[in-house]
Amino acid sequence: MTQATLFTRMIKRFYGITGPLDEYRLGQLNRIGNTALIPVLALQMLGALGAIFAVAWQIQAETALLAYVWFNMVVVLVVMAYLGGAVGRLHLTEQEVTTPKEKKRAQIWALIRTLIAGVWFTVMFHLLNTAIAWGGSGQSYASFLFQGRYLWGSLVAGGGWTVIMLIIALRRIKEVNEE
């Protein structure tokens, strides 16, 4: 058994592939990624050009920066939706199992991985959410970190994210009959 390269592990993690990354899957992922990359580069250049024009037309710096960030966020979300749909249509992320015992084990591992990722997401979301609220307030960061509304909001967001990711992970496990 050979050790997977860093590139292979990154590709598998990014696209959510749990099984082996064979030549067919790698070729399809390269095609999908290249199809998404070309419009992203064009839109990134367009966004940068818009930021340059905003500075040239003496638009407020905060407004120009906010518009640039939102434009980039929308571009990333559209590209991620495309990637998810394209990979899903080709069934590249499905994990095929042959016996009910393997399916149960795959479901347990999906649950464990999703719970770990959910805890990480919740903690990072909470730290980022409180840092954004704290910025420029003049108060201590700890006072924001332990406020109930931020804790509750982070738990709701993290719990919702975890449930959605668990549903996706469990739907990817398919039992196939080998005949």
Image (cartoon, helix red, strand yellow):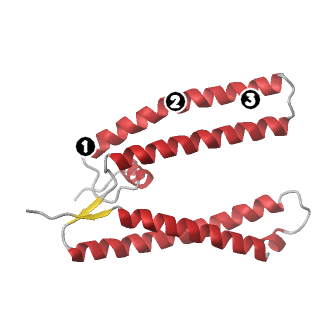
Q: How far across and down, in percent of the image, does residue 32 sit?
A: 39, 38
Q: What is the C-alpha distance between the residues marked 3 and 1?
A: 41 Å
Question: Residue drawn at (42%, 38%), measured in percent from left and top?
Answer: 33
Mark 2 vs mark 3, foreground winner is 2
Query: Does residue 158 appear left or right of residue 98 in this picture?
Result: right
Please give the residue where the numbered disc 3 appears in the rendered image: 51
Q: What is the C-alpha distance between the residues marked 1 and 2?
A: 24 Å
Query: Does residue 64 appear left or right of residue 113 in this picture?
Result: right
How many numbered circles does the render carry? Answer: 3
Question: Residue drawn at (77%, 58%), measured in percent from left and top?
Answer: 132
In the rendered image, the residue lying farthest to the left is: 179
Question: Residue drawn at (49%, 73%), measured in percent from left and top?
Answer: 115
Return the mark for residue 39.
2
Alpha-carbon neighbours of circle 2 within 10 Å: few (<14), some, or many (≥20)? few
Q: Amino acid at mark 3?
A: Ala
Using the image as rendered, state which of residue 65 and residue 84 is in the foreground.
Answer: 84
Q: Amino acid at mark 1?
A: Tyr
Q: Secondary structure at mark 2?
A: helix
Answer above or below: position of 173 versus 82. Answer: below
Answer above or below: position of 158 versus 132. Answer: below
Using the image as rendered, state which of residue 152 and residue 25 is in the foreground.
Answer: 152
Question: Residue drawn at (36%, 38%), measured in percent from left and top?
Answer: 30
Query: Does residue 70 appear left or right of residue 137 in this picture?
Result: left
Return the mark for residue 24.
1
Q: Quadrant of the N terminus?
A: bottom left
Q: Earlier in the sequence, mark 3 or mark 1?
A: 1
